[in-house]
Amino acid sequence: MSSNKIIHWFKYASPQSFYPVAGKMIPWFWALAAVFGVAGLWITFFAAPTDFQQGEGYRIIFIHVPAAWMSMFIYLVMAGWAALGLALGTRLSGMMAQALAPTGAIMAFLSLWTGAFWGKPMWGAWWVWDARLTSALILFFLYIGFIALQAAIDDPRRADKAGAILALVGVVNVPIIYFSVKWWNTLHQGASVSLMKAPTMAATMLWGMLIMALAFWMYSIAVALTRVRAIILEREAHTEWVKELPEVKS
Amino acid sequence: MSAVLAIIRRDLLLAMRRKSEVLTALFFFIIVVSLFPLGIGPEAALLKKIAPGVIWVAALLATMLGLARLFAPDHADGTLEQMVLAPSPLGLLITGKIAAHWITTGLPLVLLAPVLGIQFDLDGETLGILVVALLLGTPLLSLIGAIGAALTLGVRGGGVLLSLLVLPLYVPTLIFGAGAVEAHISGLGAGGHLSLLAALLALAVFFAPWATTAALRIALE
């Protein structure tokens, strides 16, 4: 029984069987991203009350916080795929890591950019050299390094493995980002959402942020799956099954 | 253990035969540090304030210079493949190579740093902290850098790529290293920073040779 299950799961580790499954899942994730996005934006602009200290400007955190979460989380997922690819030698894992990297880089960039927009009215500066901002910047550099390393190596198998090691080395940085708030007490305010204690923000704001985070999740999954399909087509272009695909034939 | 010592002796001997490579990195370090006062101005108070950061950034860049040569010559003449086939574990041999890299590039920086610190009007005790911080930090730079050197071995545009990969990973070392000296100057005490630096070093001594070995095996496949 259990051996059947293992075979069943590994079936989708092959690009050939994953390609059509991903194709079927993509529209669903896009639809969910749209639903959550509309709901989240409605809360952001209409339902959430004006903050009594920060005024209207605080509303950018509904983009900023989910983007920052995603930038860290995607790196963890990427490193997870990388580790899986190194341990089991599955080709799809490397492709998934490669597909996630640009989305993660965009999220890191978005969190830095929206953070600057938030910082200007709140702190009076576009950028401060605070530990958390700096480590978010380093995370962005790590993504760029990962993408650059994979782009520089021609053999895709070697690119996957080298990228995997880099991702695993870089993953040490992600907890440093997260805990830097506690390590260095500088300008940046402490985390306001915590699993341990009651959040310090209004419930509507929290809901808005969580729903926006879900929208970002769905968007990231949809984009990563679309990209991984493109990577599969590119790398497997020589195989029979790719040549048989209707979208390739036409 | 004898294999590690043999590797260190071999790399040091090679470095002795080609002194110019080691000295180039060293003079690069001195020149970069000396450029800052020229760019910023001779104001003693300001220079004293930026001295730890300047010396640390220069040490970072000087270490980077030697990294590209860490594995490339051995890769080119086939020595690296012999190391993979050797009966001693590759991880140990790589540790030996990293140690030799530190002795040829890191240790001279540590020894030179007080002289440069005097140029920036740092007092004796601060110089001591600077040396201790560099002593803990420069092996860390060699260890982390070795991972990048192994990953970019034989890759197109390896040199520039190497700095893109390694410099972001150097940031914690820079923060704690320069922070130790600054904390001492401001009267907070350097203990915390130095402990964190030592903790990072302990972590890197354990993991970096392992990651480097894995990266080398991939490069040699």
Image (cartoon, coloured by chain):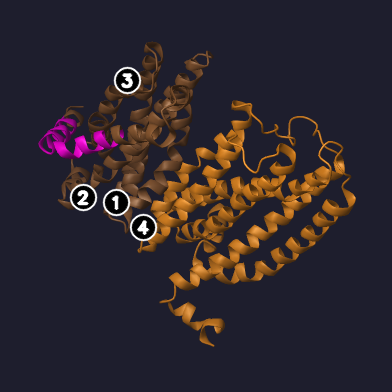
Chain colours: A orange, B brown
Tell whether position A148 is magenta.
no
Check if mark 2 and mark 1 are on a common chain.
yes
Q: Are marks 2 and 1 in contact (CB under 8 Å)?
A: yes
Circle 4 residue: A158
Q: Any mark on residue B153, and which?
A: 1
Say whether disc 1 or disc 3 marks the residue closer to the N-terminus. 3
How far apart in space, not on screen, are marks 4 and 1 (Cα)? 12 Å
Q: Amino acid at mark 4?
A: Arg
Cα–Cα gap, marks 1 and 3: 34 Å
Q: Is residue A70 visible?
A: no
Secondary structure of the residue carrying tag 2 is helix
Q: Position of residue A74 (x, y in %)?
A: 59, 50
The residue at which mark 2 appears reads as: B75
Secondary structure, mark 1, is loop
Residue B54 relative to residue A233: left or right: left
Q: Chain of mark 2?
A: B
Q: Earlier in the sequence, mark 2 or mark 3?
A: 2
Quadrant (top left, top right, bottom left, bottom right) of the C terminus of chain A: bottom right
Q: Which residues are drawn in magenta?
A: B6-29
Does mark 3 fall on the same chain as mark 1?
A: yes
